Image (tube, rainbow, N blue to C red):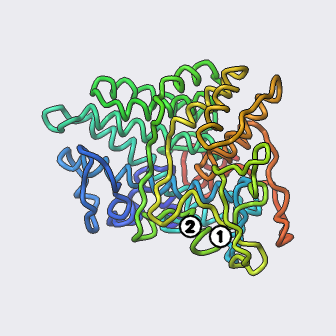
């Protein structure tokens, strides 16, 4: 197997071991800002053998969280360019392939780049998914006497595994895991739902309310994607007001930085797309999509530079799961006056006039509220695909050709090296 192939082998052990010493997959992806049980200091380079056995399980779980946080941050930035949130305004191929919707199963940056790359997607997400499932396997093989807080750790690994599967299910055309068969998005979301259900039970047993809520909202999200509206609403209604789970970021090394801020505000290689300029409601500017028109050009020298203000530094955290997201799931799943009430609660929270529509207007407004409330949080691409909404047809400033790629394809390097799907298309 080639070196590049090893990076993307179905999230199997090969994906984890591809870098030899786990300086990238572990040391630079360790979670920052964890509380209590998961508090750790960022270590130096760690050899894989240091992660064997039960004594290292806390380290392994923190590595899993860090890997997911980096993969999620890359996904938010890349999916923003694929959807209608961001224009690519850079000069490098990695800047334009996603935005132009011309990425294919042979696109190396998507398939094989690691998490320090702004274009790395499949390998970082595969590593995060593998680490979560592998951490679960190790915890299940251990006893409570060997690992303190084992049930709580199991709830954590199952919940983060669920979120990894959610991103595969929402953004990818298909996926494969652990040398297994090619799965369609619905099948992947069903796995996510199972992971969340297990996490819920474990979190309740452990008395960990935070992980229980995280898993419940994750399951609501997966169920919405599966078309199970009643189940999604049932879960989302139980998310308490004010709840928020954050993906931590840091000022230092690239794998720990906020990639949205890095690409848009710092490097000027992305610019907020015109669909989000000057959004108002009944004449009042919408502060949820507050932008800065810089009156300068982005790095390509052509596109006007418009910057977001949701993330104000390289260390700005990103929301993974929030009460507002839960409320919008209820609004979409239930509709009617319930949706109107939720929309108006969201409006009141940011000083916008109320919504008074009826009938089909309500469903359309829920979609619009998701577009604004969840701006640059990693939901828009999944919404475009799930709701069959139109994708961008061209960048109005560069005149670049646009293709028809919308979901991320299973990379050919995966297809060609996975014995379960070799030669299949």
Q: Is residue 166 above or below residue 88?
A: above
Q: Are marks 2 and 1 in contact (CB under 8 Å)?
A: yes
Q: Secondary structure at mark 2?
A: loop
Q: Is residue 120 above or below residue 372?
A: below
Q: In x, y percent, where is residue 314?
A: 48, 66
Which residue is pictured at 33% across the width and 43% down the height?
135
The residue at the far left in this view is 145
Q: Secondary structure at mark 1?
A: helix
3D distance between C-alphas at marks 2 and 1: 8 Å
The residue at the far bottom in this view is 301
Q: In x, y percent, where is residue 368?
A: 74, 40
Which mark is drawn over residue 94? 1
Name the one closer to the observer, 227 or 114: 227
Which residue is pictured at 27% across the width and 47% down the height?
38
Q: In x, y percent, where is residue 274?
A: 78, 60
Mark found first going from the N terminus, 2 or 1: 1
């Amino acid at each position: 197997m080639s070196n590049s192939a090893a990076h993307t082998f179905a999230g199997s052990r090969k994906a984890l071991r591809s870098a030899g010493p786990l300086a990238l997959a572990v040391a630079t992806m360790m979670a920052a800002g964890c509380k209590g049980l998961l508090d750790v200091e960022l270590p130096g380079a760690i050899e894989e053998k240091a992660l064997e056995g039960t004594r290292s399980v806390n380290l392994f779980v923190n590595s899993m969280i860090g890997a997911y946080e980096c993969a999620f941050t890359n996904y938010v930035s890349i999916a923003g360019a694929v959807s209608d949130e961001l224009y690519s305004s850079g000069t490098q191929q990695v800047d334009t392939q996603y935005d132009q919707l011309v990425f294919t199963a042979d696109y190396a940056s998507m398939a094989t780049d690691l998490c320090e790359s702004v274009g790395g997607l499949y390998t970082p997400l595969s590593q995060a998914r593998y680490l979560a499932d592998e951490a679960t396997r190790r915890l299940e093989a251990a006893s409570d006497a060997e690992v303190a807080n084992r049930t709580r750790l199991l709830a954590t690994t199952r919940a983060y595994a669920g979120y990894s599967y959610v991103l595969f299910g929402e953004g990818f055309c298909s996926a494969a895991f652990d040398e297994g068969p090619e799965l369609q998005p619905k099948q992947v979301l069903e796995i996510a739902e199972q992971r969340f259900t297990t996490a819920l039970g474990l979190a309740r047993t452990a008395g960990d309310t935070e992980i229980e809520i995280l898993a419940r909202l994750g399951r609501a999200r997966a169920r919405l994607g599966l078309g199970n509206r009643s189940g999604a609403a049932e879960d989302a209604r139980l998310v308490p007001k004010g709840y928020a789970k954050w993906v931590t970021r840091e000022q230092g090394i690239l794998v720990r930085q906020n990639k949205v801020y890095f690409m848009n505000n710092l490097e000027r290689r992305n610019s907020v797309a015109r669909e989000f300029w000057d959004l108002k409601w009944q004449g009042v500017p919408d502060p949820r999509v507050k932008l800065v028109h810089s009156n300068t050009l982005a790095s390509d020298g052509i596109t006007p530079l418009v910057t977001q203000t949701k993330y104000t530094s390289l260390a700005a955290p990103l929301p993974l799961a929030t009460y507002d997201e839960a409320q919008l799931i209820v609004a979409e799943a239930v509709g009617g006056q319930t949706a109107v009430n939720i929309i108006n609660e969201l409006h009141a929270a940011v000083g916008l006039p109320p919504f008074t529509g009826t009938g089909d207007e309500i469903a359309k407004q829920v979609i619009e509220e998701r577009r604004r409330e969840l701006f640059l949080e990693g939901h828009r691409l999944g919404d475009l695909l799930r709701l069959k909404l139109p994708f961008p047809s061209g960048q109005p400033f560069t005149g670049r050709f646009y293709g028809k790629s919308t979901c991320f394809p299973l990379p050919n390097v995966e297809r060609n090296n996975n014995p379960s799907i070799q030669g299949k298309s």
